[in-house]
């Protein structure tokens, strides 16, 4: 599982011209899932994300987690995080999870984040989405479950 975490002042996702999800201060998560990922993988990633201390404290140090700043989450499924462009110029997405598995695990991941007490907005799996964000910092962190 790969997740790009972007610290944002605000973010939204639009589908078919309609805003589907919108948050203020918090995290925009781009979520990629492979077939080997499990519910345990999703829980470990969610726990890690919930405890990431990448918001600034009163001394302007990245020392505060999402809960400490009453942050929200916008979660977007992103199979392209498993793109392989090593050969040729057209990426292969063979490492991305099969849609049935990835969709179920993506929704489980979001629901688990909600169970931790966070407001979670989300896109629609496999939809054509337009994502807007105001990256705060900018701060962008790449998490890979194989490295946790």
Image (cartoon, helix red, strand yellow):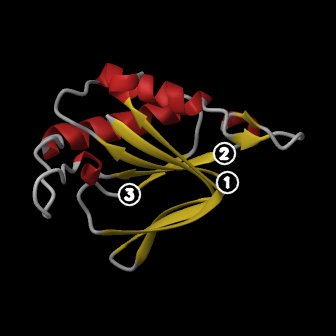
- Residue 85: % across, % down: 18, 54
Front-most of residues 10 and 21: 10
Which image quarter is the C terminus in?
top left
Q: Is residue 14 visible?
A: yes
Mark 1 / mark 2, whichever is N-terminal: 1
- Residue 141: % across, % down: 52, 43
Q: Which residue is label 1 attached to? A: 25
Horizontal arrangement in the rendering, residue 9 relative to residue 124 (left or right)? right
The residue lying at 18 percent from left, 43 percent from top is: 96
- Residue 32: % across, % down: 30, 44
Q: Are marks 1 and 2 in contact (CB under 8 Å)?
A: yes
Tell me where residue 36 sits by quadrant. top left
Q: Is residue 9 visible?
A: no
Q: Which residue is label 2 attached to? A: 71
The residue lying at 15 percent from left, 41 percent from top is: 95
Q: CA distance from mark 1 to mark 3?
A: 17 Å
Q: Which residue is label 3 attached to? A: 123
């Amino acid at each position: 599982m790969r997740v790009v975490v972007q610290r944002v002042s605000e973010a939204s996702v639009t589908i078919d011209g309609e805003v589907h999800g919108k948050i203020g201060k918090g995290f925009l998560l781009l979520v990629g899932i492979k077939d080997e990922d499990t519910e345990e993988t999703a829980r470990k990633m969610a726990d890690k994300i919930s405890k990431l201390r990448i918001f600034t404290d009163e001394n302007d140090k990245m020392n505060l987690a999402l809960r400490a700043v009453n942050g929200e989450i916008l979660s977007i499924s992103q199979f392209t995080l498993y793109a392989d462009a090593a050969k040729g110029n057209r990426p292969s997405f063979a490492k991305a999870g099969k849609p049935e598995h990835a969709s179920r695990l993506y929704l489980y991941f979001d629901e688990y984040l909600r169970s931790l007490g966070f407001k979670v907005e989300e896109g629609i799996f496999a939809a054509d989405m337009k994502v807007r964000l105001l990256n705060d910092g900018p701060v962008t962190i790449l998490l890979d479950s194989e490295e946790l």
